[in-house]
Image (tube, rainbow, N blue to C red):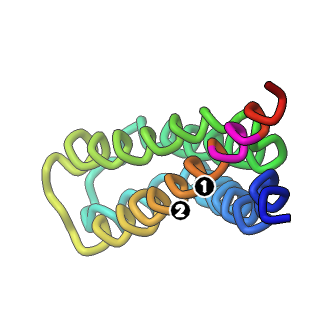
C-alpha cells in the first residue's frame, strides 16, 4: 500500500506549481503594463525606465505559463522545472547587475526574495519528488 502512494504526484506539488504560475502571470502582467511604477519602486529613483523592464514582464509571464503547464503535466515536463530554478537564480543576478547597477535598495531586496529566492526551495523539493515518482514508475515497468 505504501508503494502506491509513492506512485503519484501529490496534490500539494501541483498546488505549489499552480500558485507559482498564477503569481508569476500576475506579476509579469503588472511589470509589463506598468514598467515605470515597478522600476521607480524597486530602484527608488526617478530615472528613465530601461526598455528591458517590459521584456522582463514578458519573461515573467512566460514562466508563469510554464509553471502552469508543469502543474498540468508534472511527470512529462518535470525537467522544465530546472529551467524555472535556473531562471530564478540567473534572473536575480541579472537584475542586480544590469538593472540595479549593483545597488540594493530595501525594495529590491524584497522583490528579490519574494519573486525569486522564495520559490527555489519548493521548486527543488517538487522536482526531486516528481523524479522519484518517475523512477518508481519506470522500475515497475521493467
Q: Residue furthest top?
A: 142
* Neighbour tally class for label 1: few under 14, some 14-19, many 20 plus, Cα within 10 Å: many
Q: Which mark is residue 122?
A: 2
Quadrant, the C terminus:
top right
Q: From the viewer's side, name the closer residue of 42 and 37.
A: 42
Q: From the viewer's side, name the closer residue of 2 and 68.
A: 2
Measured Cα–Cα span from mark 2 to mark 1: 6 Å
Number of numbered discs present? 2
Kind of element beneath mark 2? helix
Image location of residue 125, percent across then percent down:
53, 57
Residue at left offset 21%, top offset 68%: 105
Provide the major secondary structure of the magenta segment.
helix
Above or below residue 113? Residue 136 is: above
Q: From the viewer's side, name the closer residue of 32 and 87.
A: 87
Residue at image mark 1: 126
Q: Residue furthest left?
A: 102
Kind of element beneath mark 1? helix
Q: Which residues are magenta?
A: 132-136
CB-based contact (under 8 Å), mark 2 and mark 1? yes
Q: Which mark is residue 91?
A: none
Residue at left offset 74%, top offset 33%: 139
Residue at left offset 14%, top offset 57%: 103
Amino acid at each position: 500500500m505504501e508503494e502506491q502512494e509513492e506512485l503519484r504526484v501529490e496534490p500539494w506539488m501541483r498546488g505549489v506549481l499552480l500558485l507559482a504560475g498564477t503569481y508569476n502571470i500576475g506579476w509579469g502582467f503588472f511589470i509589463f503594463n506598468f514598467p515605470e511604477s515597478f522600476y521607480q519602486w524597486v530602484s527608488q529613483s526617478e530615472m528613465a525606465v530601461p526598455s528591458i523592464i517590459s521584456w522582463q514582464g514578458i519573461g515573467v509571464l512566460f514562466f508563469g505559463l510554464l509553471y502552469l503547464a508543469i502543474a498540468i503535466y508534472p511527470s512529462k515536463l518535470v525537467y522544465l522545472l530546472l529551467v524555472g530554478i535556473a531562471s530564478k537564480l540567473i534572473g536575480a543576478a541579472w537584475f542586480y547587475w544590469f538593472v540595479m547597477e549593483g545597488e540594493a535598495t530595501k525594495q529590491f531586496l524584497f522583490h528579490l526574495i519574494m519573486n525569486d529566492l522564495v520559490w527555489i526551495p519548493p521548486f527543488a523539493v517538487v522536482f526531486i519528488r516528481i523524479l522519484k515518482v518517475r523512477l518508481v514508475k519506470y522500475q515497475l515497468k521493467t
